[in-house]
């Protein structure tokens, strides 16, 4: 059993490698992956979970992370920052490549223990987000929806937004973890969850 103090401890992640495809990833006892549309806040969330700004590259220019960026804990467990989807300026070829990569990664990656499916809390689930959730359900990949940018949702509309986002994703409100990497909302809780999924 972890105590309350350890729940708030950053997950000790260091950058290991960037892979083109699933076979470029290392052996790992357990892996957590972060998936979501471009600009949803995947890299920012990883930095917050690890308590290290600049660990994963964040950017104001969407569509930058095209590789599978792999981070590792001292025990060899891994976290993968997956390429973002839904980037408006992506070419048809880019999209096809993304789909093939994700499809293979999600179906073939054996140590995959949990996918954090990020949905922009300000925007709500997009059609592509719902496609990804349907894929995860169809292939029985364990996933948790994480709603990002809690700080950008006005306090007056938060309750309704939380309800609508959950309904839109076909989930109960309590199944969704709302976070803000910027304002540290629920980051300690997510650190505890990630540590548990990684088996540490
Ligand atoms: N206000 C606010 N902005 C955030 C938050 N998290 C991320 N952002 C901003 O959103 C933008 C995109 O964040 P990234 O973490 O780079 O997003 P990403 O999902 O990794 O994007 P790609 O790598 O392009 O797929 C940046 O300008 C971040 O500063 C948050 O919790 N609150
Ligand atoms: Mg990124």
Image (cartoon, grey):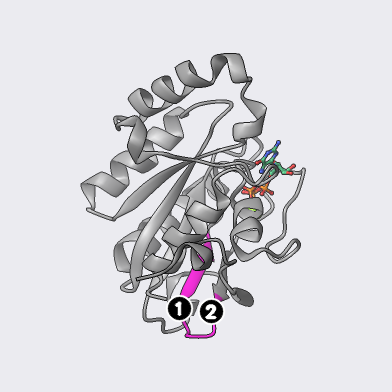
Labels 1 and 2 touching (C-beta < 8 A): yes
Q: Secondary structure at mark 1?
A: loop
- Count of numbered marks: 2
The answer to which of 150 and 192 lies nearer the viewer is: 192
Q: CA distance from mark 1 to mark 2?
A: 5 Å
Cβ of mark 2 under 8 Å from ligand 2: the answer is no
Query: What x and y, as percent, mark residue 109?
Result: 35, 70
List the residue tagged with mark 2.
Answer: 73
Query: What x and y, as percent, mark residue 22?
Result: 43, 71
The answer to which of 150 and 56 lies nearer the viewer is: 150
- Which quadrant of the picture is home to ligand 1? top right
Q: Residue at x 37, y 74 (%)?
A: 199
Q: Is residue 182 left or right of residue 168?
A: right
Q: Is residue 192 visible?
A: yes
Identify the image quadrant of the C terminus: bottom left
CA neighbours of label 1 inside 10 A, class few (<14), some (14 to 19), many (20+): many
User: Dividing the picture into quarters, in which one does residue 151 lie?
Assistant: top right
The answer to which of 89 and 140 lies nearer the viewer is: 140
Disc sitting over residue 98 in the figure: none
Residue 78 in magenta stretch: yes
Residue 148 in magenta stretch: no
List the residue tagged with mark 1.
Answer: 77
User: Dividing the picture into quarters, in which one does residue 90 lie?
Assistant: top right
CA neighbours of label 2 inside 10 A, class few (<14), some (14 to 19), many (20+): some
Magenta-tinted stretch = 72-81
């Amino acid at each position: 059993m972890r105590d309350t103090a350890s729940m708030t401890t950053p997950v000790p992640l260091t950058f290991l490698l960037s892979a083109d495809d699933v076979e470029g990833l290392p052996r790992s006892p357990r892996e957590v992956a972060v998936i979501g549309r471009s600009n949803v806040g995947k890299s920012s969330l990883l930095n917050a979970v690890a308590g290290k700004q600049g660990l994963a590259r964040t950017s104001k220019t969407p569509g930058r992370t095209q590789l599978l960026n792999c981070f590792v804990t001292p025990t060899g467990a891994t976290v993968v920052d997956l390429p973002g989807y839904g980037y408006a300026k992506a070419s048809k070829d880019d999209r096809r490549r993304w789909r093939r990569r994700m499809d293979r990664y999600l179906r073939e990656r054996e140590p995959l223990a949990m996918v954090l499916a990020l949905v922009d809390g300000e925007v709500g689930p997009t059609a592509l987000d719902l496609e990804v959730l349907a894929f995860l359900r169809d292939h029985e990949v364990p996933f948790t929806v994480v709603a990002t940018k809690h700080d950008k949702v006005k306090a007056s509309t938060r309750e309704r937004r939380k309800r609508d986002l959950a309904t839109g994703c076909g989930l109960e409100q309590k199944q969704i973890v709302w976070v803000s990497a910027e304002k540290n909302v629920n980051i300690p809780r997510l650190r505890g969850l990630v540590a548990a999924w990684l088996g540490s």
